[in-house]
Image (cartoon, rainbow, N blue to C red):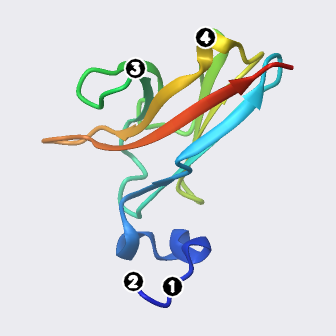
Amino acid sequence: MMGISPGWCWLLLPVCQALLVSREVSGRTGENLSLPCWYSPGYEGYNKYWCQGPRWDSCRKVVETAGREVPQKRGRVSIQDNHIFRVVLLTVENLSKADAGSYWCGIERTGRDLMKLVTVKVFPG
């Protein structure tokens, strides 16, 4: 992958990797936080989800799409899948210290799900 800027990697996602997320995002208590997760072509109709926990094999699903573009909401957390731009967006409203930690962007598939880790840090407002 020499010579390809990471900023352009999302255009070449199949070449780079199946999922692309920031390693770490941060926000302040009381604010809303959005976490984008880009995916490769071909996964548009798959169920995408965000789960929380230190390990991919034991994390707890926070919210999921059911394979549709219709926004889904559970409490202060919502998820939106855009099939045209191939991005799943997790939004956490009214951020609190308890929201800090490890999150996984996931795509459900046969065998092991595709998953990428994102660390969320929360600072005082």
Q: Which mark is residue 1?
A: 2
Q: Give the distance between the C-alpha atoms of the residues marked 2 and 3, in whole angstroms.
A: 33 Å
Count of number-bearing discs: 4
Q: Residues within 10 Å of mark 1 (few under 14, many from 20)?
A: few
Spot occupied by residue 15 in the image (x, y as percentages of width and height): 36, 76
Quickly name the residue at label 1. Answer: 4
Q: CA distance from mark 1 to mark 3?
A: 34 Å
**Mark 2: few/some/many CA within 10 Å (<14, 14-19, 20+):** few
Q: In the image, is 24 to the left or to the right of 43?
A: right
Q: Residue furthest bottom?
A: 3
Marks 2 and 3, the one that precedes in the sequence: 2
Residue drawn where x is 61% and y is 11% of the image: 98
Quarter occupied by residue 81: top right
Asked if residue 83 is positioned above or below residue 48 in the image, the reply reads: below
Residue 55 seen anywhere in this rendered image of the structure: yes
Can the viewer see residue 82 in this picture?
Answer: no
Residue 101 drawn above or below residue 81: above
Residue 31 or residue 82, whichever sits in front: 31
Residue that mark 4 sits on? 98
**Please, what is the three-letter code of the amino acid marked with disc 1?**
Ile
* Residue 100 lies in quadrant: top right
Q: Nearer the viewer, mark 3 or mark 4?
A: 4
Mark 2 to mark 4: distance in Å? Answer: 38 Å
Which label is found at residue 61? 3
